[in-house]
Image: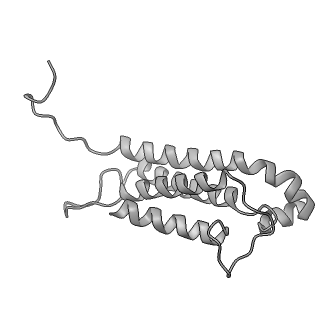
Amino acid sequence: MTAVTVAGVVGVLIGWVTVLIPNTVFGRDIAPVAWNYPVLVATAILSGLLAATYVRTDSAGPAPGDDDSAGARSGRLGALGAVASWFAVGCPVCNKFALLAFGYTGAQTWFAPFQPLLAALGLGLLWIGLAIRLQNQERCMVPAEWSSP
């Protein structure tokens, strides 16, 4: 349930602010490109899955990996990945950082071609954060009668 909720919130939040979900509050000077939508969906799904690894259903204490450096590292990687994906699917000339660094023409010339790489970086960071988190989860022992010979 947590994964679905977080994925929905991340997808709607990023989609609404970047105007991949049309709305009257925000505007976009340059139309979205086709790859923006799959990146938005993948970002939402990976964010939801990563967030779900931090939820524990019993009251035995913190979830495995919460107190170690790997758990903290995976959370930071996930946050950086989501932010990178956010900038990747956003309008290149609506990004204030790109406008300050490059100007309007520079944002189109230099930042826009960099956005697919930023999307790959963001999704990669989310994937690595999730992989680290899942790798550090406790595993249940398989009964001897279930194991293969």
Q: Residue at x 73, y 51 (%)?
A: 115
Vertical relation: 35 (above or below) 29:
above
Nearer the observer, 135 or 52: 52
Q: Residue at x 43, y 58 (%)?
A: 48
Q: In screen coordinates, is 147 left or right of 129?
A: left
Q: In screen coordinates, is 46 left or right of 88?
A: left
Q: Is residue 80 visible?
A: no
Nearer the observer, 22 or 3: 22
Q: In screen coordinates, is 16 left or right of 67?
A: right
Q: Is residue 67 visible?
A: yes
Q: Residue at x 86, y 57 (%)?
A: 108
Vertical relation: 105 (above or below) 17:
above
**Image mark count:** 0
Q: Position of residue 47 (x, y in %)?
A: 48, 57
Q: Residue lying farthest left? A: 145
Quarter of the image that includes the C terminus: top left
The colour scheme used here is one colour
Q: Residue at x 86, y 51 (%)?
A: 110
Q: Residue lying farthest bottom? A: 25
Q: Position of residue 96 (x, y in %)?
A: 79, 69
- Residue 6, by quadrant, is bottom left
- Residue 97, by quadrant, is bottom right
Q: Position of residue 7 (x, y in %)?
A: 46, 62
Quarter of the image that includes the N terminus: bottom left
Vertical relation: 25 (above or below) 5:
below
